[in-house]
Image: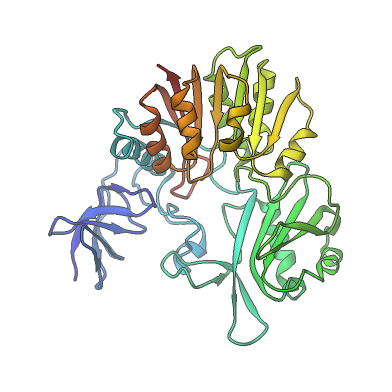
Amino acid sequence: MNDLVAITGIAAGGDGVGRLADGRAVFVPRTAPGERVRLRDGVRLHKTFARGELAEVVAPAPVSGPAGSARVTPPCPHYGRDRCGGCQLQHLAYDAQLAAKRAIVGEALRRIGKLDVADPEIVEAVEEWRYRAKISLAVKPVGRSDRRTVGLQPYDRPGAVFPLADCHIADFRLMALWRELKPRLELLPAKLTRLTLRLDREGRRHVIAESAGEPWLDADRLRAALPDGDAVICWWQPAEGAARVVAGPATGFPATAFEQVNPEMGTLARRWAVAQLGDVRGAVVWDLYGGIGDTALQLTERGAQVVSVDADEQAIEWARGREVARPVRFIAGRAEDVLPTLPEPLGVVVNPPRAGLHWNVTLRLTGQPVPRLAYLSCDPATLARDLQRLSVNYRITAVRAFDLFPQTAYVETVAVLEGV
């Protein structure tokens, strides 16, 4: 098949989308809106859609605006050579990426949420590159030997792993750590399944080794062998069980706790969300799925009486040790379990995982509407679903997107609601 397809937009996963001659939507990775492309043979046909691969760009997107064409040359060699799945939009100019993300959010809110809203404005990233404070690497054994490949995965072969030289969206300090680790992989657990590198806000670097075998016995040797090993903390994550420090100080930032991979942009999104609650001086505000307390701290600075809830006990323990403008009640527990025990709030901030709000949280918020609600989401689809459920007793007053994840199809969205 050598179908010519006009690419009309970017779908939620980052693929370009067009239509086949029979009317079916076809998703084509690494294409740009406005292009006419030829597809490779072997288009995979499904009942209502198809998936294809780019053979050639027959007609480029028309030049519009000072940025010129939507397509650019990706700077990362892994993006084209290894078909790296870590980024989906490196082939698009940055303004085209922002336009695509606005459309992804708007389309989800209209189609899934049944909401009459326009594509939201988007706050562009402070840095387009080197912003990630965390990177997770996949591991694949090489044959029957003790050798293994540690790196990232091609988007079209999820079972494969290519060796990582450099990730252009990861912080330089993480890539420096990776260069130091590569010649010493034999000191990692024998049955390593995943390797995560993370920076913390105290300037230290964390190595989190996940494995299904015996405990990580060489962590001290690895730490001693690294040029800046004193600033490295090694964690072992068993296949079943909690992660624990096996080399380095066991106190300090919990490297397994959730934190935005782009801390600077995460702060901007939270600050805007908190500001939308208005005057909260002296008022009770819930911070649900609050993690390590970043939102709680911003709320206390505005004079609120904050109750912050998160299921991660390590995150809550660390949050309790932070300096705050006024006392915060930090609760380690699942939001859906503790809501009945909390005082009535004037405002609520929710920042749930990708799966969205637990149904019982939605029931509480709709059964007893609060005056103001700010919802931070990393998934437009689950956000749209939850907003549709909340719409019975709330109206949306503002929506804004934040580009926390340049070069990828992911986007952070903040929706502000008022109880009616």
Q: Residue at x 48, y 41 (%)?
A: 356
Q: Position of residue 113 (x, y in %)?
A: 33, 35
Q: Is residue 192 left or right of residue 228?
A: left
Q: Is residue 369 left or right of residue 32?
A: right
Q: Is residue 82 left or right of residue 1?
A: right
Residue 414 in sight here = no
Residue lying furthest front: 340
**Residue 379 to residue 303: above or below:** below
Q: Position of residue 383 (x, y in %)?
A: 42, 37
Q: Nearer the viewer, residue 130 or 65?
A: 130
Residue lying furthest left: 22
Q: Nearer the viewer, residue 420 or 34?
A: 420
Q: Nearer the viewer, residue 322 or 170?
A: 322
Determine the image quadrant of residue 148: bottom right
Q: Position of residue 354 (x, y in %)?
A: 49, 45
Residue 113 in sight here = yes
Q: Residue at x 74, y 76 (%)?
A: 186
**Residue 65 to residue 324: above or below:** below
**Residue 164 to residue 60: above or below:** below
Q: Quadrant of the C terminus?
A: top left
Q: Quadrant of the N terminus?
A: bottom left
> Tag count in the figure?
0
**Residue 150 to residue 12: above or below:** below
Q: Residue at x 63, y 27 (%)?
A: 341
